[in-house]
């Protein structure tokens, strides 16, 4: 009883101190260090105030950052990131975000946002071109530097993003062709992203599973529900044989490719390259990020 009261008083004191600092335009949150870490190159044990633009680097232990806006960022061991009031730049290692869509994680020029304040998303920097993203709870969206949606990561899934896939306007998607309002759409079965496709002879592929290769038209406005327009030239559609897509196929897209291993593309060591969006290869991978023991159950937001 007595120890609980003491902990409550200490917590209130920390919050009060943080509010005073924030009002003065200096602190945006508190870092709680497990083991040792550095905050702006100063060695820290226990708690430390975090400023807008502070660099936090962990050693063998993890650190948890609680910000004034309600966002929480956890850094795994041997990780480094730069913290701002509305985003974090993950430079090394692994980070976990528990926040709404108004807070972002940037890694290798890609942007990761969660769907709502109850979502928990994990991001790992593998090297200068590859990151992995896993959704512990809720949905994560991954966008490139131009704001193009690369993938929607659903709970329990892990994707790897390789930025050496090809030209920025390149796209390769697989899924069922739908026709709505005179336009054609494909929901990629791995990334769960809907593309409007344009080109000759598409009517013959309606309600059939196809592989589409084309170029993203950045000047076109996609139809309802789509995030991009892919222009397909003659020969850019393959497949389309068989009895067609089963009822409800498009709505269930994204489940079929989970955890699928196969031919490995350049730089993707753990999974198959199953889609290319905006020059970024997106692969489903097995294990790893979502099963990581870097963060405690309390930290995971569950």
Image (cartoon, helix red, strand yellow):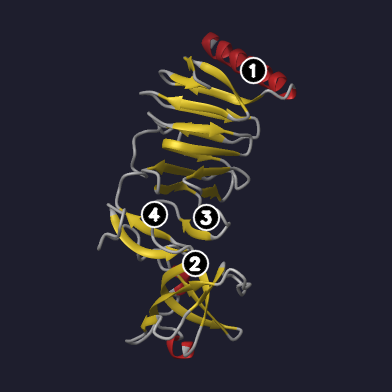
Question: Comparing marks 4 and 1, which lies closer to the viewer?
Answer: 4
Q: Secondary structure at mark 3?
A: loop
Mark before the other along the chain sequence, 4 or 3: 3
Q: Secondary structure at mark 4?
A: strand
**Real-space Cα separation, disc 4 to disc 1, in angstroms:** 44 Å
**Real-space Cα separation, disc 3 to disc 1, in angstroms:** 40 Å
- In the rendered image, residue 238, in percent from the top left (x then y), is placed at 36, 81
**Real-space Cα separation, disc 4 to disc 3, in angstroms:** 11 Å
Q: Secondary structure at mark 2?
A: loop
**Real-space Cα separation, disc 2 to disc 3, in angstroms:** 12 Å
Question: Can residue 298 be seen by looking at this rendering?
Answer: no
Question: Comparing marks 2 and 3, which lies closer to the viewer?
Answer: 2
- Contact, mark 2 vs mark 3 (Cβ under 8 Å): no
Q: Which residue was labeled with disc 2?
A: 169
**Real-space Cα separation, disc 4 to disc 2, in angstroms:** 15 Å
Horizontally, residue 69 falls left or right of residue 270, namely right
Mark before the other along the chain sequence, 4 or 2: 4
Q: Which residue was labeled with disc 1?
A: 12
């Amino acid at each position: 009883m007595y120890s609980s009261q003491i902990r409550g008083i200490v917590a209130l004191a920390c919050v009060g101190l943080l509010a005073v600092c924030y009002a003065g335009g200096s602190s945006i949150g508190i870092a709680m260090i497990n083991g040792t870490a550095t905050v702006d190159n100063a060695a820290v044990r226990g708690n430390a105030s975090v400023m807008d633009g502070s660099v936090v680097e962990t050693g063998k232990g993890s650190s948890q950052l609680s910000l004034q806006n309600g966002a929480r960022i956890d850094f795994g061991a041997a990780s480094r990131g730069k913290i701002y009031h509305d985003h974090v730049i993950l430079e090394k290692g692994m980070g976990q975000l528990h926040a709404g869509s108004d807070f972002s994680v940037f890694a290798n020029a890609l942007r990761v946002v969660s769907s709502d304040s109850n979502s928990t998303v994990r991001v790992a920097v593998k090297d200068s071109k590859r990151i992995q993203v896993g959704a512990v709870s809720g949905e994560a969206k991954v966008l490139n530097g131009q704001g193009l949606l690369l993938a929607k990561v659903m709970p329990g899934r892990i994707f790897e993003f390789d930025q050496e896939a090809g030209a920025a306007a390149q796209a390769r998607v697989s899924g069922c062709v739908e026709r709505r309002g005179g336009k054609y759409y494909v929901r990629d079965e791995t990334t769960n992203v809907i593309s409007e496709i344009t080109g000759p002879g598409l009517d013959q592929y309606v309600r059939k599973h196809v592989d589409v290769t084309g170029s993203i038209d950045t000047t076109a406005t996609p139809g309802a529900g789509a995030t991009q327009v892919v222009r397909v030239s003659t020969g850019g559609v393959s497949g389309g044989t068989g009895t067609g897509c089963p009822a409800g196929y498009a709505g269930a897209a994204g489940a079929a490719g989970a955890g699928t291993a196969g031919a490995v593309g350049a730089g993707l060591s753990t999974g198959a390259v199953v889609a290319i969006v905006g020059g970024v290869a997106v692969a489903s991978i097995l294990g790893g990020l979502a099963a990581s023991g870097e963060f405690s159950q309390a930290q995971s937001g569950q």
